[in-house]
Amino acid sequence: MNFARMMVAVTAAALVAVPGTAEAAACAWKPVPLPMPAGAVQADATAADGVGGHVGTAEFAGSEQHVVRWSGSTITDYGRVPGTFPNGLTAREVNRGGVIVGNASQLYSSVAFRSAGTALARLPLPAGTTSSRANAINDRGDAVGWAVLPDRTRKAVLWPADRPETAVELGGLPTGFVEAVDIDEDGTILVRHSNDQYNSTSYKWRDGVATALRAPAGVKSAEATGIAAGRVSGTFVYQDDSRRAGLWDAAGAPQVLPQGNRAESVNRGGLVVGVIDAGAVPILWRSTTVESVVRTSEPLYLGKVGDDGTIPGHYTRQPNNRHSPVVLRCS
């Protein structure tokens, strides 16, 4: 089953996620099961809509995958993108209005999609490109991602809410391997550029102007992963290849977060989700302070944190490694 790479893994010691002994939170973080869609053999939850709903991917007989949405006790099946492979499908983001974006697979390429009602529709490709992926959408409905050129380089792309059949290539950025990874509610787009050595520089892009995010001393690669209310989550890679979780404040000042090796996403309230590589244990920060280290008896993978403070994900269950959808909640 092909799931989003930007998820957080954990293997540790108890069935219920609990605060770490040194990092007690004001509440207990607990994985709450989501119901399995009817007929599905496994499923994962990857993103939250910020108002209690979640989206993900369910797998049925014959490895066929569908995008699904959980909202209260209701599960909506969006099916697949017409003309794409039955698997290789990922729901990457959903907004408060329930519009979902992500990508599907077809021969030698990826297809960016956006939901329209309860169907999934392809997003247009920029001229001269062959493949695409939508990574994020804001509440206005602006979607961002990337498109691939024949030489395999990438361009950052915006699909505006008011021009849904238009793909806008972001200007004022370096050429090469360029990705739009997230979008804030004010329209600021988070962009990551990687050079030939796979080292990254990250940017905030707004109205045609790209502003590079400053990295701490000794960092060779600043890999931004998410943006909310101006804050940016990410990972700092040092000259010795060690990795530390990072957060840029709204003014662009970088901060190394304690304990973690990666920061994967951030919400408007300043809740940051990341991972400690030793044992692949998820860690949560409230702004720059450790709130909880999450420990479970089964492998747990966490997706993008929602503005309602919920974190979707899935367990990997033994003995067959089937995925079971959950939402991490603080209660």
Image: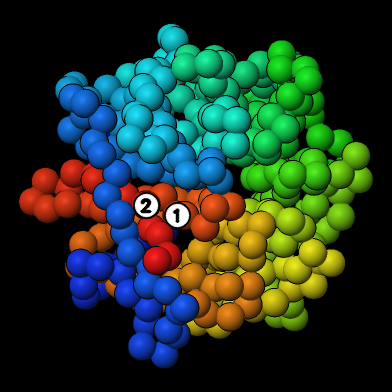
Q: CA distance from mark 2 to mark 1?
A: 6 Å
- Up the image or down, 168 lies above or below 48; here it is above
Quadrant assignment, res 139: top right
Identify which residue, 331 or 22, lies in the foreground: 331
Number of numbered discs: 2
Instruction: Find residue 54 and report its horizontal and vertical position in percent.
Output: 44, 40
Instruction: Find residue 59 and report its horizontal and vertical position in percent.
Output: 26, 30
Residue drawn at the location 35% of the way across and 55% of the way down: 301
Q: Earlier in the sequence, mark 2 or mark 1?
A: 1
Question: Residue 281 bears which disc, if any?
Answer: none
Residue type marked 2:
Val
* Residues packed near mark 1 inside 10 Å, few (<14), some (14 to 19) or many (20 plus): many
Q: Is residue 51 visible?
A: yes
- Up the image or down, 85 lies above or below 91; here it is above
Image quadrant for the N terminus? top left
Instruction: Kindly give the residue lying farthest to the bottom in the view shown.
Output: 22
Query: Image check: 43 left or right of 238?
Result: left
Reading the image, the residue beneath label 1 is: 311
Instruction: Kindly give the residue lying farthest to the top in the view shown.
Output: 83
Quadrant assignment, res 330: bottom left
* Residues packed near mark 2 inside 10 Å, few (<14), some (14 to 19) or many (20 plus): many
Q: What kind of colouring is applied to the model shown?
A: rainbow
Identify which residue, 178 or 287, lies in the foreground: 287
Residue type marked 1:
Ile
Image quadrant for the C terminus? bottom left
Query: Image check: 271 left or right of 10?
Result: right
- Helix, strand or loop status at disc 2: strand
Reading the image, the residue beneath label 2 is: 327
Identify which residue, 95 or 187, lies in the foreground: 95
- Helix, strand or loop status at disc 1: strand
- Up the image or down, 79 lies above or below 37; here it is above
State yes or no: discs 2 and 1 in contact (Cβ < 8 Å): yes
